Amino acid sequence: MLFSLGVGISTISYATGIKQDTLARWMKEVSKYCKNVHDTYIRKVNCKFIQFDELWTFVGSKLNQQWIWSAVDAPTKLLIGFVVAPRKSEYARVIVSEVASRVINKTLIITTDGYASYIKPILDLFPKAMYAQVVKKRKEGRIVKVTKKAITDHTIKLIEYNLRALGLAWNVNTAIIERLNLTKRMLMSRLSRKTNEFSKDKTALKNNVYQFAVFYNFIRPHMSLRVKRGDKTSKRTPAMAANITDKILTWHDVLRDRPMIPIKAM
């Protein structure tokens, strides 16, 4: 649990007296269960508004830059898929293909940043979607201008009308995926800036993202997903909001040969 909350292995080792190599080996085993849960249950998701983005990090040294390409279903906050890879055009197709294989509704709304490499794979794999980009112009590291650009044959006004009609958002944005990227930095110690917890190899980074995905989707309640029933307020995870499960899970539920995940009837 400490690792899931952003505490680094070296700190956990110091606090518990358990060797770092032992902790790393345990984390590797945990990631296998997490991969199984993610690949098994994040399937046939009924999405309405998907946002894509990339989060920078590195492996070994800053010369080996890697990016965590991710997609989130904005209404449920569900992390649908991710790819750990360089920021090269071919990996835009990889993440879009990954997401397309996990969702059932292809008539939806999609937003990304201004990265041009998203355009062709999204048009190919989501031909019925409404797609717009949020293009940010920076000067000396600060955002000085934001432009919304319709990529499909729809106006920005029409896309925003549909967002409001579905009760999803008031305007074209990538706010949910950007907030998710911040959550990753907060809960994954290897993504923290200016520390010695950075990833030493790509496999460890990918394993950590699987652990984050399960913790975020199934175990950690999302503050914005709370619902009020009478006088009580119920907490929900993204997986609950997406009708994948009907309860908040624990690590005990996940770390089993057959994960104890009660699935709602589709």
Image: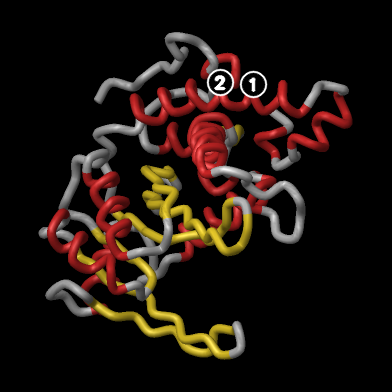
Query: x%, y% of residue 117?
Result: 28, 68
Q: Which residue lies at the image location 51% right of the left edge and 11% below the top edge? A: 256
Picture residue at 67% right of the left edge, 28% below the top: 24
Q: Position of residue 22 (x, y in %)?
A: 72, 21
Q: Residue visible at 63% across and 45% down?
A: 200
Mark carried by residue 26 = 1
Compared with 126, 80 (above or below) is above
How dense is the environment of label 1, judged by Cα within 10 Å: few (below 14), some, or many (20 and up)?
few
Say whether residue 145 is left or right of residue 163. right
Q: Is residue 115 left or right of residue 58?
A: left
How crowded pointer 2 is (Cα within 10 Å; few <14, some 14-19, many 20+) is rated as few
247 vs 200, nearest the viewer? 200
User: In the rendered structure, which amino acid carries the disc numbered 1?
Assistant: Trp
Residue located at (44% from left, 49% from top): 84
Please give the residue where the numbered disc 2 appears in the rendered image.
29
Q: Position of residue 2 (x, y in %)?
A: 73, 32
Q: Secondary structure at mark 2?
A: helix
Horizontal side of residue 134 vs 124, given as left or right: right
- Please determine whether, in this image, residue 134 is positioned above or below residue 190: below
Q: Quadrant of the C terminus?
A: top left
Whether label 1 touches label 2, CB < 8 Å: yes
Q: Quadrant of the N terminus?
A: top right
